[in-house]
Image (tube, grey):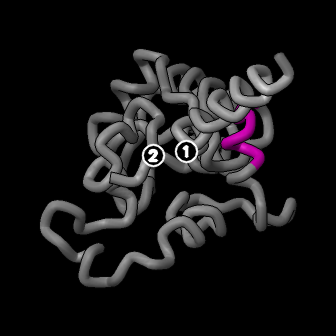
């Protein structure tokens, strides 16, 4: 009997790696539409709430582009992002994303966070420059399930 319980536990644990790189996806239609016009709607758990607040407060210069929108719409999207941020509602993925980010830091680029850098350090510059990738923020080029929160190696 004990042997069966141990075997069941081992087999149950073997499924955990499949969930290891899963992040709660963005499901809010307004956020998906507004952010998805130019890029994938990044999961809020990748940055702390202070980062999303700052980003949504400077949409007229959103990484060189004007992503301005009505203030009530921007506020609603900010609330969605803050609610799921690494330090508010990001769960286990959020806790991992926060490692190495000091409370005094407000990162605005997911690609410059310690977690992203560590997970991608073995990727050569040549890979980043492939036509289908072109930028470190093009998650779906390598992680086909990125929009649904799945970042399994592919």
Residue for point 57% across, 29% down: 24
Q: Position of residue 28 (x, y in %)?
A: 48, 17
Q: Kindly identify which residue carries mark 2.
A: 151
Q: Position of residue 139 (x, y in %)?
A: 36, 52
Compare residues 111 and 31 and report the one nearer the observer. Answer: 111
| Secondary structure mainly formed by the magenta segment | helix
Compare residues 140 and 111 and report the one nearer the observer. Answer: 140
Please, which residue is most extreme toward the left here? 131
Secondary structure state at the residue bearing disc 1: loop
Residue for point 58% across, 59% down: 108
Q: Of the numbered discs in the image, which one, if any, rests on residue 33?
A: none
Q: Residues within 10 Å of mark 1 (few under 14, many from 20)?
A: some
Compare residues 27 and 74 and report the one nearer the observer. Answer: 27
Compare residues 34 and 57 and report the one nearer the observer. Answer: 34
Instruction: Look at the image and tell me in which quarter the N terminus lies.
Output: top right
Horizontal side of residue 2 vs 64, given as left or right: right
Marks 2 and 1, Cα distance to the nearest angstrom?
5 Å
Res. 106 image quadrant: bottom right
Taking the magenta stretch, the answer to whether it contains residue 94 is yes
Residue for point 77% across, 46% down: 95
Secondary structure state at the residue bearing disc 2: loop
Q: Earlier in the sequence, mark 2 or mark 1?
A: 1
What are the residue bounds of the magenta stretch?
A: 89-95
Q: Position of residue 36 (x, y in %)?
A: 32, 34
Q: Is residue 148 above or below residue 17?
A: above
Disc count in the image?
A: 2
Residue for point 47% across, 41% down: 42
Q: Is residue 143 above or below residue 129?
A: above
Q: Kindly identify which residue carries mark 1.
A: 21
């Amino acid at each position: 009997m004990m042997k069966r319980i141990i075997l069941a536990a081992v087999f149950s644990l073997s499924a955990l790696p499949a969930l290891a790189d899963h992040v709660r996806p963005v499901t809010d239609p307004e956020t998906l539409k507004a952010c998805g016009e130019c890029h994938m709607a990044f999961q809020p758990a990748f940055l702390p709430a202070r980062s999303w607040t700052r980003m949504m407060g400077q949409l007229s210069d959103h990484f060189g582009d004007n992503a301005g929108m009505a203030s009530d719409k921007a506020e609603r999207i900010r609330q969605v992002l803050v609610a799921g941020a690494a330090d508010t509602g990001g769960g286990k993925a959020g806790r991992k994303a926060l490692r190495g980010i000091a409370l005094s830091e407000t990162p605005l680029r997911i690609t410059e966070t310690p977690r992203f850098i560590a997970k991608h350090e073995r990727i050569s510059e040549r890979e980043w420059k492939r036509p289908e990738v072109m930028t470190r923020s093009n998650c779906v080029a390598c992680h086909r399930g990125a929009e649904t929160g799945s970042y399994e190696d592919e």
